[in-house]
Amino acid sequence: MNTQIEIHTEPLNVQSCIDWIMSPHSGGIDVFIGTVRDMTKGKTVVCLEFEAYNQMAIKEMEKIAQQAFDNWPVQKILIHHRTGVLAVGEIPVIIAVSAAHRAAAFEACRYIIDTLKETVPIWKKEVFEDGEVWVAAHP
């Protein structure tokens, strides 16, 4: 199996993702870790809340992974996304890509996170000290 695509309600484990993506065939591994930051547009973030239409989100992430395989010579792809309420510093998304050469891993990883943000049915509520707002997911 060369893909691992999951949606979790519990904290994501960076090391287990890296362990899964490692391969003796890979000369390059790119890992994107999205974290909850403490400020957005000058406003203090209290927390973020992520919701997903899980079945459709998984299918869309599978489609994105296949597009990456079709466009770059990559070997393995991991996409993990978290749902629920996340505090500042927690991890809502991990994308990992392995390839024989680093350029393909970098390019495919960037494509996956950028496309995920545009097309996957995951929504984010930003909770600030003075209110909250639902926006498309931008982990």
Image: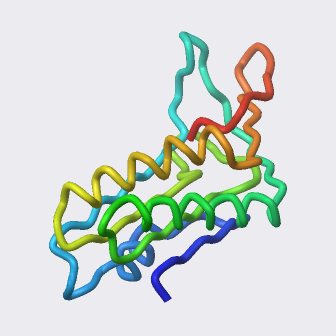
Residue 91 falls left or right of residue 110: right
Vertical placement of residue 73 versus 122, above or below: below
Q: Where is residue 75 in the image (x, y as percent from the top left)?
A: 34, 76
Q: Position of residue 127 (x, y in %)?
A: 74, 28
Between 5 and 88, the one nearer to me in the picture: 5
Between 133 and 53, the one nearer to me in the picture: 53
**What kind of colouring is applied to the model shown?**
rainbow
Q: Where is residue 103 in the image (x, y as percent from the top left)?
A: 20, 55
The part of the image, by quadrant, that contains residue 88 is top right
At x 69%, y 67%, the residue is 8
The part of the image, by quadrant, that contains residue 93 is bottom right
At x 37%, y 55%, the residue is 108
Residue furthest top as drawn: 42
Between 106 and 70, the one nearer to me in the picture: 70
Residue 58 falls left or right of residue 56: left
Residue furthest front as drawn: 70
Q: How many labels does the image show?
A: 0
Between 38 and 106, the one nearer to me in the picture: 106
Residue 106 falls left or right of residue 58: left
Vertical placement of residue 81 versus 121, above or below: below
At x 54%, y 77%, the residue is 4
- Which quarter shows the C terminus? top right
At x 48%, y 69%, the residue is 78
Q: Where is residue 82 in the image (x, y as percent from the top left)?
A: 66, 58
